[in-house]
Amino acid sequence: MKKRNRDLFIFLCATAVVLGCFFLAYMPRKTIPDGEKRIQNFAVYRDTSSRASFFDVAENPDLFTEHDRSTFFTGRTKDAVWLRFSLAPADDPEECRYLWIRNASLENITVFYPGAEPVLAGKKQPVSSLKVQARDWYIPVPDSVTASDSIYLRVETATIMWIPLQAVSSSKMIKQIVNEYLFFGVFFGIILAILCVNAFSLLVVKNFNFLCYATYLSSLLLYQLRVHGFLYLIPMPFAVLEAILWISLGCLGIFLMLFAKSFLSLAKRMPITNTILNTCIALFIAQTVIGIFFSSYWANQIAYITGFIVPLIILIAAIKIYFSGHYEVRFYLVAWAAMISGTTIWSTAAYIESRIPANYFFTVGTAINSLLFTLAIFDMIKMELNEKELVVERENYYRNLSRSDPLTGLYNRRYLSELINRLESDGEMPTGSALIMIDLDNFKMVNDTHGHLAGDMILTKTGTHIKKHIRKTDIACRYGGDEFLVFLPGANETAARSIAESMRNDILADFTYSETGEEIKITVSIGVSENRLDDSFDGLFLRADAALYQAKKLGRNRISVL
């Protein structure tokens, strides 16, 4: 019950996190006034032909529509978007100013300042040509630009057309870059650390879940470095950047689904869901091929659909499996709650504008989910190890039960016969050994007089006395009703007789009470024999048995050696 309450608490916290993320992303709130962003007279023109030149738009001011804020969002579009605006005077004229476009995914950006050459930026421009090499776009503003000058900015991209525009001072730019690098550094560091843990665990445990998850984490890290603009800082052709994007995204989705299929045992528990995920894997492969060789626009359309549907399918499957009694998936379920809050906001960013950049939710969500997924794997492995230990304990119990006597704890006659036969067939029978045969004197009379309960107690105590005087390499068994046999590998006649005498004295000194409180003492007769050259166990056994018979014939409570 306590475990279920703990799980309920975990799920409530996960639900609160998901709702909180959506609340932060889409809750209407007071926006930063354009005056604080230093942007004025913001207007937009959508060039559906994508062919209009600067002179075309500059000479036709009526093409532009006034916009109420200095951020333009329209999701995905093939249009080229023109922005026209002016800048408010700088707070500190001594500081340089920069246009800050807070979207690292934009591909082609061109800024037209009055009386200056166009400034190019965006993913398709060589990083070496940028004045400020950062993950976002910081475009220097010439000192000659005044508040009355109109600035034109053209954007054309296959990614989301989201253009949040601000004018910032050099000090604010540096502060923002440092904060961004610190934020992403922390969460990328978490993912990298978890990747190392999973990779090491894979080498040690060799579990398929670790293989899938380590590959997923590698793809996730590469994908995040690409979409958040960090790989752009490494000089490489845009085609290579695009290939990295689609390959990492494809591997991310494929191995995440393979991990889900394996961890949740979907092929066995939910075959229909398993088939749906196989179809989604095919979609991810198609998406990768289309993105690299054909159209990134259509590949993105597939990506946003799969990015929304796949987490939802797996989350529903995990919930169903949990409530069917498989409580070990609780960490996995919570991990998907964190995952879905980030991926849903990220995948719907093409259709709904988030108040806080969607990349933050995606980064935080995947970092938290990576940690929880790792906990889920270790929790599952712990459960599997516990199950294996239980199976081993059960097997050992039944194995011991099949070869031991439950009353005395000694081996039984069957185990002794199997052991001797194995040693003789393998040629491992010790050449120097001895055998002790013990028989309780008048035991039948004790049973008849005092009852079987008293007899069982005597047998149990006899077994205890025998075990007290033997080595770990010796084999003691209850051979029959009141007969015991001790095989002593490597012992000679003298050593065997000494051990037998110690056993006899201990048994003689002990006593048992009957149900009526009467004291019961018992004696034993013992036969001892030593192995001879080219002797078999049967020969040794017959001599020990004859010695026992001789001890009984001579008056019992004694040891005889042959």
Image (cartoon, rainbow, N blue to C red):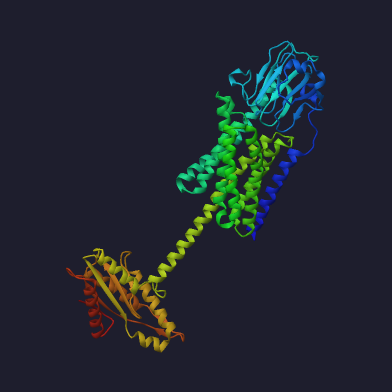
Left or right: where 458 falls relative to 60: left
Which quadrant of the rendered structure holds the C terminus? bottom left
Residue 51 position by quadrant:
top right
Return the x and y of residue 372 as percentages of the image width and height: 60, 46
Is residue 239 placed above or below 435 in the rendered structure? above
Is residue 266 placed above or below 341 in the rendered structure? below
Return the x and y of residue 135 as percentages of the image width and height: 63, 26
Residue 197 appears in the figure = yes
Which quadrant of the rendered structure holds the N terminus? bottom right
Residue 512 position by quadrant:
bottom left
Closer to us: 248 or 529: 248
Closer to us: 510 or 260: 260
Left or right: where 278 falls relative to 104: left
Return the x and y of residue 342 as percentages of the image width and height: 66, 40
Residue 31 position by quadrant:
top right
Return the x and y of residue 225 as percentages of the image width and height: 59, 32
Is residue 287 placed above or below 266 in the rendered structure? above
